[in-house]
Amino acid sequence: MLRHLLATTAIVAAISTAAVAGETAAMKDGGQAGASDDTGVYEFELHTLAPDTTTGILATNMVGKPVVTSRNAEGEEIGDINDVVFGRDGSVHAVIVGVGGFLGIGEKEVALDFARLNFVAGEDKRLIVVSDVSRQELEAATAYERPDYIPYWMTTEGAREQMDKVTENARSTYETVRKEAIDPARQQLDETMSTGWTEEKTEVDAASVSTDELIDSTVYTNQDTNIGEVAEVLIGKDGKAQAVVIDVGGFLGFNAKPVAVAFNSLKMFETENGDLLVTAPFTKEQLENAQTYEPATYKANPDAVLLKG
């Protein structure tokens, strides 16, 4: 069926784009992708090779976070953390803070002693990075010069820029897929649904149609309007088909509304090409306004859910 072919294309595109964007968000946020606020860092518990657990903060989670003079509303943002400097003993000696500039352009980097930082509890388990250093003190400080033998792309800040590029590429890929695949698919589906069927047809005995043939078959009104596709065949206690569930509306199967229709209200035809054609004596409006099919409700009282012709 056309809808399922197009749905596969859309799903692959969506998953590919979402996966790239999701991985990028996770890398940028130090494993806290999806957090409601990106201005704080997170402390977590982890197991190392030592017998006892420890707590810590990811360096990647600190990069890009602002340093403020106070947790209060009057606190001033003095810059963003661009990198973290560790000693051989594993202790953090300093953070590299970008001061001034606009969007990283024209800013000066300053090495700020880690001892000048405090982590103050914020909302949602976030920690706000606070320092007693003033903007004036940072602006007057000697600029940090990155060693020539350390390529910029190997730095945390360089990695962040690369991740930003990945995010932008993912966004661009999505736009391309939407314009070149999803939008044309939507248009093609709309055109297919609006034209109905035009071939010659011969009515067939519904009892001769198998469940496999019915699943995914398109259902039309008597006026040739496409109203959905058969998603499920409901079997009664006698082992015979009692009803079908038609997915009404939606796009490519998403957000479609399932509606249970009595099996004996359907008519089935074979087209000149050998395709199965199913019709139902209901308007599209009747199906859209019908009760949504829910297995538990149907099992308890089928007559309260079924549309009957």
Image (cartoon, helix red, strand yellow):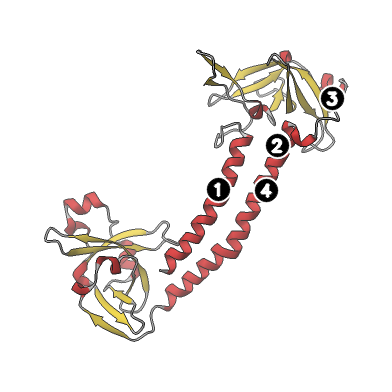
Q: Earlier in the sequence, mark 1 or mark 3?
A: 1
Residue identified by numbered label 4: 168
Which quarter of the figure has residue 44? top right
What residue occupies the far bottom of the structure in this picture? 200
Q: Position of residue 262 (x, y in %)?
A: 21, 66
Residue identified by numbered label 3: 144
Q: For the residues marked 2 and 3, what is the alpha-carbon distance in whole angstroms? A: 19 Å
Q: Is 121 on the left-hand or right-hand side of 247?
A: right
Do we see residue 77 in this rendering? no
- Check contact, mark 2 vs mark 1: CB within 8 A: no
**Rendered residue at 60%/39% (across/down):** 25
Residue 160: image tag: 2
Q: For the residues marked 2 and 4, what is the alpha-carbon distance in whole angstroms? A: 12 Å
Q: Position of residue 11 (x, y in %)?
A: 49, 56
Nearest the viewer among 285 and 132 is 132
Q: Position of residue 187 (x, y in %)?
A: 52, 70
Q: Quadrant of the C terminus?
A: bottom left
Local SS, label 2: helix
Q: Position of residue 144 (x, y in %)?
A: 84, 25
Q: Earlier in the sequence, mark 4 or mark 1?
A: 1
What residue occupies the far left of the structure in this picture? 238
Q: For the residues marked 1 and 3, what is the alpha-carbon distance in whole angstroms? A: 37 Å
Q: Earlier in the sequence, mark 2 or mark 3?
A: 3
Which quarter of the figure has residue 293? bottom left
Q: Is 122 on the left-hand or right-hand side of 160?
A: left
Q: Which residue type does callout 3 highlight?
A: Tyr
Q: Earlier in the sequence, mark 2 or mark 4?
A: 2
Q: Which residue type does callout 2 highlight?
A: Arg
